[in-house]
Image (cartoon, rainbow, N blue to C red):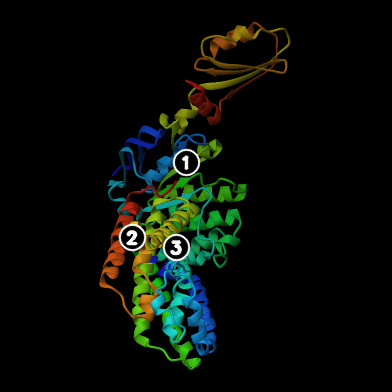
Amino acid sequence: MNNIIEIKGFKKYFGKLHAVDGIDLEVKKGEIFGFLGPNGAGKSTTIRCLMGFNKLTDGSISVFGHDMSKDPNTAKKQIGYLPGNVKLYDSWTGWDHIRFFENVRGKSSNLENLIDRFDFNPSLKFRHLSSGNKQKLGLILALMHEPKLLVMDEPTVGLDPLLQNEIYKVLMEMRDSGTTIFISSHNLPEVERLCDRVAIIKEGKLVAVENIKALGDKKLHKIEVRFGNKFDVSEFAINGVEKVEEISEGLLITVGGDLNPVLHALAKHKIIDLEITHASLEDVFMKFYERDA
Amino acid sequence: MFVFAVRMLRDKWKSFVIYAIAAVAFLEMYIALFPTISQQAGQFNELLKTMPPELFKAMNMDPATLSFGNLQSYLSSEYMSFLWPILAVIFAISLANYISVSEIDKGTIETLASLPAKRIRIFFERYMAGLLLLIGFCIISLFGAIPLAIIHNTDFIIGNFYTATIGSFMFIWAVYSLATLFSVIFSEKGKATMASGGILIIMYVVFIVSTLKESLKDLQYISFFNYFSGSDLLAKNTYPEFSILVLGGFAVVVAIVAAFWFNRRDLSV
């Protein structure tokens, strides 16, 4: 089976609110798939339906070939789930959570390894843990049965950079060992660093599903230029220019496609400083969002 | 096996012990006072005769059985008519809330739902664990009177306590099922508790009104309090079969509806 997740015509409405309005998506075996979008775009709703927590209004979601509306439990045996801001039982210790999960899922073979790796003390009650340690416990619970699919909903929200890096390392190792990872985020550097492919969701609809490299190669450039003479912004309203912003003694020009027309326009001026960079994923992301806005 | 039931028992045992101790403490207080009160039973009974019959109806008591001359009648009026139902109802609602709405309210339901276990299994394991705790509460809170009566050299009729335990359990089982239904319908604990408490208050008011006003007499049948009388159970040692059928039938049907609802609803909101 090449596709671990298959989403077809998925809709989720809450009364008049169309949280997700017809998306189709496939996640292949062994890839880290990023699910991008700002707050309220429909990321968490999709994940909740993907995990079988919520019912679909229309369409279908299957994981490992199992329809998550009809038979979610067979698939859940192979899924590890980590929400952002993990919410567990305040009065239980880490061990209570771990034993409870083991009683349902079976004995874990890599528990000791995970506890050591995250330097986690399972003897403390959940309510006494810091937010970082809460997330560590969530991660241990998600990974302890060595899932073949890891679903994560903004897993590094509010974590310090050290723990973020440790999580990234674990995810890369899991990907290398064949685990498929579906990660929702609005942290673009995180997605850029981790993911093989991304889907961008906007107001409940997918606006793009791209290979991360292809997204970066969209020939979107940023030109920061400072002039030694007078200039007119309107000179740069030419084909391919996405955006022109005035900065001190110059312009910040975002160009999609061929750079040459802009370089010709720039050549007519005395230039003090010029920097041309590939746009970041964030710029590409913003482009998708600003389009049709 | 029974992971979710065992976990609920572990999580709720402290509440169970607190409610059970509270009930036994009240029993001890009443039974310790009983020898003194029973010596002046004649005066108390005369005093009771001066009170309006409507007052007894409002307290769900039968004036005919109201006597401080024996332990059963005394406890039925002092303990079973008001205090025991309050303790039991609060405990039942807290158990019912644990099944679903507390988890949804706190957001822990996602962790639970991410496990490979059928929702129906989670629901019924928890429901049955709650029921087990309620059975334990009924036994301790009523049979707890027996050792205390022995300690205080007070006569008792054990058969009346059997009847009272069965009748009280049927009542609280129906309350528990109703609260469970609200627990699976609502996503906020406060709303579920208010709904359960509100319905019970309405039932109580309906029952009182129906006993006071002849034209509204038939309304009594929609109230749980029509099928639960401390006087009948403990003092008279009677429990009509239709009460078992109505409360038990209601409890079973409503539990099935709640299970169906829990299986269909969006858990993460």
Mark 1 element type: strand
Which amino acid, by three-letter code, is at mark 1?
Answer: Ser
- The residue at 58%/51% (across/down) is A163
Position above or below: A200 against B153: above
For the question of whether residue A122 can be seen, the reply is yes
Q: Position of residue B157 (x, y in %)?
A: 38, 88
Residue labelled with disc 2 = B217
Q: Where is residue A204 in the image (x, y as percent from the top left)?
A: 42, 32
Find the residue positioned furthest to the front: B50
Mark 2 element type: helix
Question: Disc 3 is attached to a residue of which chain?
Answer: B
Residue labelled with disc 3 = B93
Which amino acid, by three-letter code, is at mark 3?
Answer: Ile
Position above or below: A19 against B10: above
The answer to whether mark 3 and mark 1 are in CB contact below 8 A is no
Q: How crowded is mark 3: few (under 14 residues within 10 Å), some or many (20 or more)?
A: many
Q: Position of residue A177 (x, y in %)?
A: 41, 51
The answer to whether mark 2 and mark 3 are in CB contact below 8 A is no
Q: Distance between the residues labelled 2 and 3?
A: 29 Å
Q: Single out the mark in the foreground, 3 or 1.
A: 3
Q: Residues within 10 Å of mark 1 (few under 14, many from 20)?
A: many
Q: Position of residue A139 (x, y in %)?
A: 49, 54
For the question of whether residue A98 can be seen, the reply is no
> Which of these two is toward me, B60 or B193?
B60
Q: How far apart are marks 3 and 1 (CA)?
A: 37 Å
Question: Disc 1 is attached to a residue of which chain?
Answer: A
Residue labelled with disc 1 = A184
Quarter of the figure with residue A120: bottom right
Q: Single out the mark in the foreground, 1 or 2.
A: 2
Q: Distance between the residues labelled 1 and 2?
A: 60 Å
